[in-house]
Image (cartoon, rainbow, N blue to C red):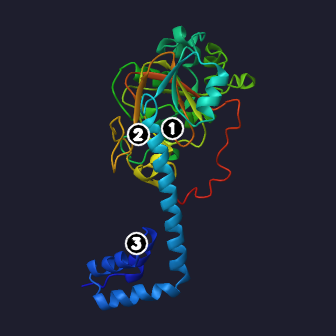
Amino acid sequence: MAQPDKRMLLAEGLAAGDDDALLHARLVEAGVSAAAAKYEVDRLVKDPMAAMLRQQATRMAKQDWLFANQQRLAFEAEGGFALDMLDKPDAELFYRHYYEANRPAKLIGIIDHWPALTRWSLDHFDAVAGNNVVEAQVERERDPDYELDKDGHRRLVRFGELIDWLRKDEASNDIYLTAYNSGNNAAALAPLWDDMAPIGLLDDRRARDGFFWLGPRGTLTPWHHDLTNNLLVQVIGRKRVRMAPPWAFARMRNSRHCFSDWGNEALPAGEGDGSAPPVLETIIGPGEAIFLPVGWWHQVEALDLSASMSFTSFRRPNAHVEDYRSWGAI
């Protein structure tokens, strides 16, 4: 029978905040004799690495307490833990109470002036850009990590061929033209920007910015958080958006970069429990939008053939990666 790795067990216990009694119990439970367990625990008093792990566990406990307070405040708010809906919001109100407060909101009435709301259709896309070559994400259903491995799913396709496939109206998560493809698609899809107009909440000096999304019903963007603040605007079809707050980090099962191990799990809306995070859920339809603050976890599902735009061109600096020191580690 293999001997337990005592140092690993101690490290796990120290990182979890175990005191000496819990460390001793952890070792004994793993098969270490009581006498050997006492010896290993007693000598930690002279181990500087153990001291640092204990200090870090204390800091994490303090962070957990702060997050718990944020949860209490959210649950005790008037109306409870809920998503606000803003109708043609004033920019000052939006920035003060939502953007700067890191608070999501559903917005209506902000693109009522867009010609795209009446022009956009598969026929229109085909007419203005059908012969152009675009990049899309393909063969996603064969890969459980399709979002993490999205570079491997890039393919060039004539836009008209993609449109012909979408006309079948088949539910699929296998092909999706996403924001990640926008760098290669900006020129090919430039005519579509003529169907849009500045949004009052955004920086009007960057009116041609934005990221185009097009896919069938059934496309799923798994649970993740963005590294910027984002405004997702729906033009064709409906999308279901589920969101979980940054202060629920411990329950979001984050083991790789900005992705959650919950993946495409349809976490239920509500206050959550000891293992599942609190979740806000809404459906956005044509002309509606959702503000997704940086750090908020979200999952997006297309309920119909869907065309959307997303924007990061706010009136505030929107770069949040310079001090992201754990990039690549978690």
Q: Which residue is mark 1?
A: 155
Other-residue count near label 1 (Cα within 10 Å), few / some / many at <14 / 14–19 / ≥20: some
Vertical comparison of 220 with 64: above or below: above
Q: Earlier in the sequence, mark 2 or mark 3?
A: 3
Residue 204 position in % (x across, y down) = 72, 22
Secondary structure of the residue carrying tag 2 is: loop
Residue 272 position in % (x across, y down) = 35, 42
Outermost residue toward the left in this view: 1
Q: Is residue 50 left or right of residue 190?
A: left
Residue 23 position in % (x across, y down) = 37, 77
Q: Which residue is mark 2?
A: 139
In this view, the mark in front (1 or 3):
3
Q: CA distance from mark 1 to mark 2?
A: 9 Å
Q: Which residue is mark 3?
A: 18
Other-residue count near label 2 (Cα within 10 Å), few / some / many at <14 / 14–19 / ≥20: some
| Nearest the eye: 196 or 28 | 28
Residue 15 at least partly seen: yes
Residue 123 position in % (x across, y down) = 49, 12
Q: Residue at x 36, y 30 (%)?
A: 218
Q: CA distance from mark 2 to mark 3?
A: 46 Å
Q: Disc 3 residue type?
A: Asp
Q: Residue at x 55, y 74 (%)?
A: 52
